[in-house]
Amino acid sequence: PDGRPPAGFTGTSQNLTLSLTGFDIDAANEVQVRVNGNAAGYLAVTPDNGTGTSQFTILASQQVSGANTIQFVATNPAW
């Protein structure tokens, strides 16, 4: 309903790596990635109508016990 795909994982006592492929990301601040509501970074810029890989380290200290959330937030939802 809000245009944001939900994602999540179970917290661990170890650092984790989130790797994903973005599509048609035109600006360095176009899509923010949040872990448990806290900014983790932005998706990498991709070629026009193309894909590219983004990678983020989720530190053990950023995780909570049990369910953790990942959000992808467009800085300009009209894009």
Image (spheres, helix red, strand yellow):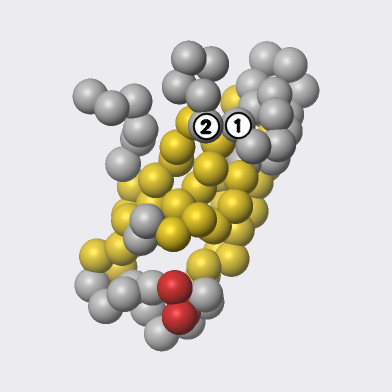
Q: Is residue 31 left or right of residue 36?
A: right
- Amino acid at circle 1: Glu
Name which residue lies at 60% across and 31% down. Answer: 30
Q: Is residue 50 left or right of residue 19?
A: right
Label of residue 75 in the image: 2
Query: In this orientation, which residue lies closer to the viewer: 74 or 57?
Result: 74
Q: Is residue 29 left or right of residue 77?
A: right
- Residue 45 drawn at (x, y percent): 72, 33
Name which residue lies at 34% across and 25% down. Answer: 3
Question: Nearer the N terminus, badge 1 or badge 2?
Answer: 1
- Amino acid at circle 2: Thr
- Residue 40 drawn at (x, y percent): 54, 57
Q: Is residue 32 left or right of residue 71?
A: right
Label of residue 30 in the image: 1
Where is residue 73, by image quadrant? Answer: top left
65 w.r.t. 2: above or below? below
Q: Residue furthest front?
A: 76
66 w.r.t. 37: above or below? below
